[in-house]
Image (cartoon, helix red, strand yellow):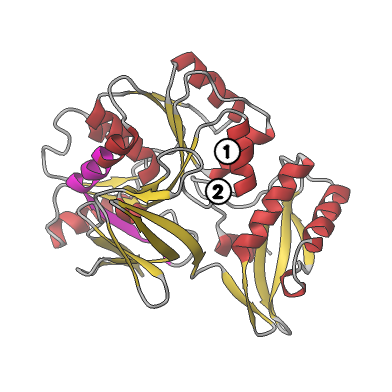
Amino acid sequence: METAVILQPGFWNDGSAWVAEPAASDEGRALTKFAQDELQMRDICFFQTSGTEGVRKWVGLTKEALMISARAVNAFFDITARDHWLLALPAHHVGGFGILARSFASGSAVSVLEGKWNAAAFVQKFEAAGATLASLVPTQIFDLVAAELRAPATLRAVLVGGGALNAELEAAALAHGWQIHRTYAMTETASTVAAQPRPGAELEVLPIWQVSTDAEGVLSLRGEALALGYAICAEGRWRWEPVPPTGLRTRDRVEIVETGSRRCLRFLGRESGIVKILGELVALAPIQERLDTLRLKLGLQEDAVVCDVPDARKEHALVLVVTQTMSGETAARLLHELNETLRPLERIDRLQSVAAIPRSDLGKVLMPALRTML
């Protein structure tokens, strides 16, 4: 189905189950049948998780959950019919679909960036449409900054989610006029959980969410916009995995800071993305942040990522993976300067080039696919 079709007046008025995908597929048709015939579900839409690890899952979100999230984001950012979105994310992912839902709820206009992502084309389209709002992922922000593209005069806010935004990249984007508002969002939460009310501020939890942490500091979420559960297909058979009544336990370690009526999230780390090297735990995210900072410093637009691979002696080894468009001399310099900033256990063991680094539609590195390539 075309997800944009949902957002017509009276959408879902037939009570159907929907599958958000770029084009109809056998899997999507089977999932629709499973939801309607076996689960007896109506007014629900399934989005494939945008995560990069583990089995493939479809997240089941009700129409009401999607609209609760949309109205909460509109209220937080004061989005009204005066605004104009430029949609530059796939509508079959909850991040792109959320823009359509917010537009439907607020009466704001939406223009669509057609074709493959291109930073210059995005700015040109934004200016031509007189857009005020956009939602982007860190990879897209990197492209805008690397191309030294300044923000259009009509821009009011750019919501950035889908991954951690490097502090140096955020500062560079702000220097180019991009009004960055970092957000914390998940497919399971129908989009945004927390966001910066203004650039540079802490991530403030939207009022629709109840947040808590366990003894290890891992964040759990409850709220009316939370998914019902996951549809999972294994060996040709579908099964349903509900979200517990107690809420969704994420993989993010946070500190919850309360100031009056405001609740803010400070991120401390993530359960995933940690590997063991010579018996010590090493977090990949800070290493990737340093790599991205170096790419900005050196003015490199070529893709590069740090990946872990099994190692008989060390348990895991780290590889700097670059695209073949990067010269050998530049890649060697990048590796050397990166290792100069790292502790001995964190240092990269080898350099490898590939035709293209596998990424999801939202720009996240598909680590299992990359490890297979290596």
Residue receiving disc 1: 141
- Viewport quadrant of the N terminus: top left
Question: 202 or 24: nearer the eye?
Answer: 202
Give the amino acid at mark 2.
Leu
Q: Is residue 236 visible?
A: no
The x and y percentages for residue 207 are 26, 49
Looking at the image, residue 373 sits to the left or right of residue 227; the answer is right
Q: Is residue 154 visible?
A: yes
Looking at the image, residue 185 sits to the left or right of residue 286; the answer is left
The residue shown at (47%, 44%) is 201
Looking at the image, residue 257 sits to the left or right of residue 357; the answer is left
Quick check: is 34 in the magenta stretch? no
Q: Secondary structure at mark 1?
A: helix
Magenta-tinted stretch: 55-71
The x and y percentages for residue 353 are 76, 55
Question: 183 or 186: nearer the eye?
Answer: 183
The x and y percentages for residue 208 are 24, 50
The residue shown at (76%, 43%) is 297
- Viewport quadrant of the C terminus: bottom right
The x and y percentages for residue 123 are 55, 23
The 10 Å Cα crowd at callout 1, few under 14, some 14 to 19, many 20 or more, is many
- The disc placed on residue 165 is 2
Quick check: is 66 in the magenta stretch? yes
The 10 Å Cα crowd at callout 2, few under 14, some 14 to 19, many 20 or more, is some
**Could you tell which of marks 2 and 1 lies nearer the N-terminus?**
1
